[in-house]
Image (tube, rainbow, N blue to C red):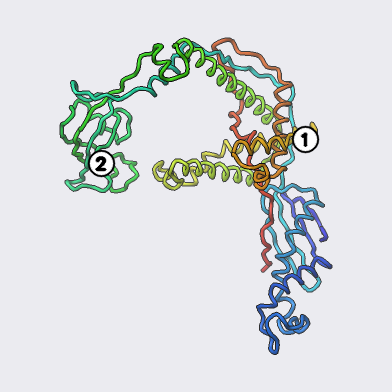
Amino acid sequence: MKLLRTDKTETNLYELEIRVEGDEWKAGMDRSFRKNVSKLNIPGFRKGKAPRAMVMRMVGEDYFYEDAVNMTYSDAYEKALEESGLEPVDRADVELKEVNGEGYTFVAKVTTRPEVTLGEYKGLAAVREDSAVTDEEVRGELDRMADRNSRLVDVDDRPAENGDTTEIDFEGFLDGVAFPGGKGEKYTLVLGSNQFIPGFEDQIVGHSAGEEFEIAVKFPEDYHEETLKGKDTTFKVKLHAIRKKEIPALDDEFAKDVSEFDTLEELKADLRKKLQERKTAAAEERLENTLVDAAAANAQMEIPPVMVENKINEMVQDFDYRLQSQGLNLPTYLQYAGMDMSAFREGFTPQAQQQVRVALTLEAIAKAENLEAEEEAIEAEYKKMAESYGIEVEKVKGVVSAGSIATNLRLNKAIDLIKSTAKVTDAPAGEKAEAAEKPAKPKTTRKRKPKAEEKAEEPKAEE
């Protein structure tokens, strides 16, 4: 491989002209010949048994060029990257310039990691918000526990009210004809939950268990089903049951029922302790985000659009995975949200830009401060991941590269450096810290996904 030239054509964009010849080209042609000779019919010989010289005379050596190029250009590109010192952030756009018996030349257009000029990142000023737990917060946690341990009891002495849980049969009609998807039996509906279209639940209020009645509702103009948009419809409803939530009293018996404690005071003390731990951790995370964002805001860089697009791709994929874990998928979500993919992706743009900017800043700080990940720390991280997923360490190593773990550890060291040198003051009791100048850093910096190795695209012959 010969790197003929390295030209910077635009900001973060380079052209590498690379020549493959000599032993590398010969080895590629040999591999291509072995791959293809068995496919050729040479008169007087069985497939794959004709002498190479005869095959070349019969079909021409250019028959083997394409595979020979495809078998050699990737290694040549990787060697050229190493020689040039460039760090690509996306697959290269590769164009084949010429190919003959002596070898070939190709040009790779490479988008590189941007240069980062760091600003202030040590001694940054920030305020840590007050994280003291209030009596109201403890009471709120108790109320939520009571609500989770409530039970539904039948109501026979009054009509339905908002907040009641009802059991209904219903069937919808458009112009007197039942429409698909508009029927349900023994359906559980909490009045006031806005689970149904506007007006439906309100018209159940005031009816008693056992009643049958009709409800007139108009579907919204933006309803997802085209045939029902803005249409006046009628629902026949039968109200089978009305139930209200019975919340247990907050006393010692409640504490015994829902926890390992014998008294309500012991339960409250435990809740306060756990709330304090959560609020302290949240306050520290917000402080960290504020400091890291300030360091990123002080840095100067020109981020290649492809880095933002790649980050958006990750975020969309992650969103889709979370939907699938709930039995949904992204196309269905977009349909019900009334949104197309372009608008959906656009919503991630500010967050993606900030994530990329933060990551680049932390990488630059780690480099400037010579922060490295020790082997012991990498092994400890592997062990922690294995324990978390309940699998063997070696299996984790087969999926997650040591390089990606080392990168995360170096970024964490950069975060710790920013935080340890910061001038932090505590907000007065009951007050929150001032918001950061930039949007809060998403919670992905410490758990970045391993980055796939960059690969060049297959070359395209020049027409």
Identify the residue at image location x=43%, y=44%.
Answer: 328
Identify the residue at image location x=72%, y=57%.
Answer: 108
Q: Position of residue 73 (x, y in %)?
A: 74, 62
Q: Splitting the image into 4 quarters, where does residue 263 fall? A: top left
Q: Position of residue 288 (x, y in %)?
A: 64, 25
Residue on which disc 2 sits: 184
Is 291 located above or below residue 254 in the figure? below
Task: Sort mark 2 into few (<14), some (14-19) or many (20+) by Cα contacts within 10 Å.
Answer: few
Q: Nearer the viewer, residue 367 or 113?
A: 367
2 or 1: mark nearer the eye = 1
Disc number placed over residue 374 in the picture, else none: 1
Q: Quadrant of the C terminus?
A: bottom right
Q: Nearer the viewer, residue 275 or 125?
A: 275
Identify the residue at image location x=73%, y=76%.
Answer: 62
Q: Is residue 354 visible?
A: no
Give the mark nearest the N terminus, 2 or 1.
2
Determine whether, in the image, residue 333 is placed left or right of residue 82. left
Q: Amino acid at mark 2?
A: Gly
Q: Secondary structure at mark 2?
A: strand
Is 217 located above or below residue 271 in the figure? below
Q: Is residue 60 visible?
A: yes
Disc number placed over residue 326 in the picture, else none: none
Is 456 located above or below residue 193 in the figure? below
